Image (cartoon, helix red, strand yellow):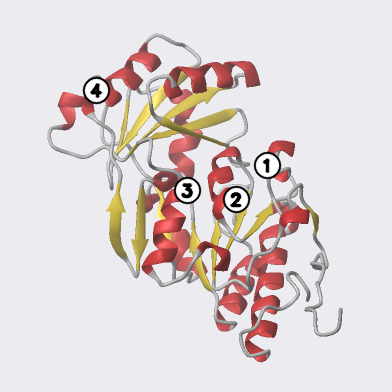
Amino acid sequence: MPGAPQIVRPVVPDGMRPGGQFSSWCGEPPSFVLCDVDGTLIGSEHLATNRVVTAIATARRSGLRVGIATGRMRTSVDVLRSQLGADGPHVFHNGAEFQVDGHTEATWTLAPDDVDALIAIGRTRDDCYVEICTTDRLYVSSNDERAAPHWEMLGVEHSGIVTTAAQLDDQLVVKATLVAFGVSGPVLDELTQVVTSAGLAVGAAHSPRTPGLFYLNVTHPSANKGSAAERAARAIGLDLAQVAAIGDALNDLPLFARAGTSIAMGQAPEEVIDQAHLVAPPVDDDGAAVALEALASWRQRAVRAGGHQDEPGTV
């Protein structure tokens, strides 16, 4: 029909491939990108590679705001944030806290009864223990040396053993983590079911730096990376179609479900890749840098075109 708008099929950027949701990809040129940390921005080293740092600088010059969305506590990524120079907003504690321009805008906390129930789980099992995070402190349910690689990765010394929430006095608990030791998928599923049956949110994660350890991030039922990203985007005047997300684990799925453009890392489980629009190379091949470079190029093209919708993913 004369005058009918031309339908433009999205183009896969160089170095990436379609994900399971590629056919439904219709996001706007991004203005804000949120990146997971472990398995995305960093692999087996404690900081990002030079290419990732350069890609973030390129993205920012293109007009993209760059933030991190991590299951970690805020203080454990201070050095990384300084290295990256990312301006945020940032999401911490698996979505239980987000910051805009260095100021915490909102937190979602666990009730003392929830904390006691989680500690009880760790006390009755030998395959996991519990870490309890306030906004800036880490407590543990026992001094289990099997978790030492995690403490080293976080770069945060724990502030003591807690056996009941009452020991925390008036400190607010933002997140708890069940750290599982060398378990199989069915055991993780069992632990997840135990926590969700208590009405709490669970986000499973892992890190290349701690093989053999698995993390179940437990938060208030309203807190996850996706809900925090939605609030963070709104705080800077954006809608979710203008948000891109890069991640590799199950706890990134709520973020993928909301972002206009979702990018899975190449080493991500199939269930994560199935929920992504695009798939970048693995973390050891600087997949996050490949994704950020493509997003920056797309953003630059859109700006040159006067802010109109461009072909998603064209580089």
What amino acid type is highlighted by mark number 3?
Lys
The residue depicted at 29 percent of the width and 59 percent of the height is 105
Q: Position of residue 268 (x, y in %)?
A: 70, 43
Instruction: Give how far apart the Cα atoms at labels 3 and 4 are.
Output: 24 Å
Q: Name the residue carrying label 4.
A: 113
Instruction: Give how far apart the Cα atoms at labels 2 and 4 are.
Output: 31 Å
| Label pair 1/2, CB-CB below 8 angstroms | yes
Mark 4 vs mark 1: which is more N-terminal? 4
Q: Position of residue 111 (x, y in %)?
A: 24, 30
Secondary element type, mark 3: helix
Side of 25 relative to 252 (left or right): right
Q: Name the residue carrying label 1.
A: 272
**Location of the C terminus (image quadrant):** bottom right
Point out which mark residue 256 bears.
2
Instruction: Give how far apart the Cα atoms at labels 2 and 3 are.
Output: 9 Å
What amino acid type is highlighted by mark number 1?
Val
Mark 1 vs mark 2: which is more N-terminal? 2
